[in-house]
Image (cartoon, rainbow, N blue to C red):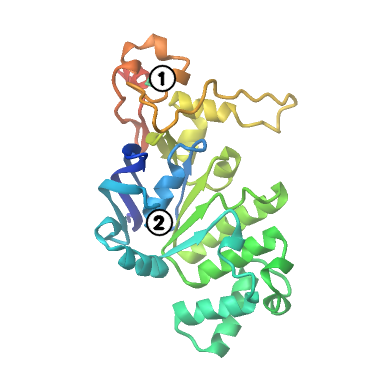
Amino acid sequence: MEREKVLDVKNLYAVFKIQKKEYEVLHDISFDVHRNETVCIVGESGCGKSVTTLCVMGLLPKNGRVISGSIEVDGTDLTKLSANEVRKFRGKKMGMIFQEPMTALNPLLTIGYQLRENLMLHRLVDKKTADKMAVEYLTKVGIANPESRLKQYPFQLSGGLRQRVLIAMVLSAQPDLLIADEPTTALDVTIQKQVLSLLNGLKKDMNAGIMFITHDLGVVAEIADKVVVLYAGRKVEEGSAQQVFNDPRHPYTVGLMKAVPNVDKDEFVIEPIPGMFPNITEEIPGCRFNPRCAYTKQCPLCTKEAPEMLEVEPGHFVACHLVKENAQ
Ligand code: SF4
């Protein structure tokens, strides 16, 4: 039986206006997220992963706009809704976890008050039931002594605990789609692992889909079912976590893999991707990766035409002229 899609992004194009001129920041981005699935959107800073998140949340800054494409959450196309309708829809269907939980938690209110209000608003329960549920949710996210934690203010908790409280808060609203934007980047490695394993464990329990944004392939390996690799506003590779990790085909994905330190090996060799990430105002004919790609000289098309997406095996897609040539 096919799993239900909670997010379906199709042919999304977005632009940002800088000094009266519009520049394309997303070009033909498509991907989907099913229930009980974690889809990681990966790439270096500036690749388009944060803009994609802002589009899905309906939170693009004033100088940004979606010019075409659709973003369906539970079958409703958010690009057809007004800003007010998107805000209401977001509150009901989507939950968000950010790198810094303090952006979502009110520093002046106790954890208990915030959780209770959230439960009363989203689950329509009375105060007494909400208090009981608050204890249950803190227990669910692995917080010991939940009753005493509820009396504390966010600043009294460590970064890892604050992130757990935020996860409890988001889960308590029972979202269909959970958006996690670099949620573990500010945490130390041990706590990071705990939060990732918590999200993994809760995925089934929530019956939600997770869109997980990260630049860290180590994190992707821990949590992803599916991986979407973006480069300079374009999707360059997509596949199951197994396909992308075991058999990366796009030279940029291969470069990202080599740029991750392998702590299992004795030697600690990191091979950074050569060259600079392009600025959005920069026009690059052909494949946007060509100035940094080691194979550009092998294929005359690389500097002339943008490569199309090719399915190299079921569910595994790559946009690269050389991969296409080799497959023919
Ligand atoms: Fe490299 Fe050409 Fe493939 Fe782009 S299309 S990634 S430049 S080989």
Total marks placed? 2
Closer to the N terminus: mark 2 or mark 1?
2
Q: Which numbered marker is on residue 290?
A: 1
* Alpha carbons under labels 2 and 1: distance apart: 31 Å
- Work out whether residue 60 or residue 260 is closer to the camera in this orientation and state it: 60
| On-image quarter of the N terminus | bottom left
Q: Quadrant of ligand 1?
A: top left
The answer, for residue 95, to whether it is visible in the render is: yes
Find residue 174 and name its label.
none
Residue 146 is situated, as x and y percent measured from the top left of the image, at: 69, 75
Tell me which residue sits at (31%, 15%) in the image: 301
Labelled pair 2, 1 in contact (Cβ < 8 Å): no
Q: Nearer the viewer, residue 226 or 126?
A: 126
Ligand 1 contact, mark 2 (Cβ < 8 Å): no
State which mark lies toward you, 2 or 1: 2
Which residue is pictured at 32% across the width and 43% down the height?
14
Up the image or down, 325 lies above or below 72; here it is above
4 to the left or right of 46: left
Q: Residues within 10 Å of mark 2 (few under 14, many from 20)?
A: some
Amino acid type of disc 2?
Answer: Leu
Residue that appears at 71% across and 49% down: 188
**Figure check: 173 above or below 8:** below
Image location of residue 87, percent across then percent down: 37, 66
For badge 1, the amino acid type reads: Asn
Secondary structure found at label 2: loop
Does the Cβ of the disc 1 residue fall within 8 Å of ligand 1? yes
Q: Which residue is mark 2?
A: 59
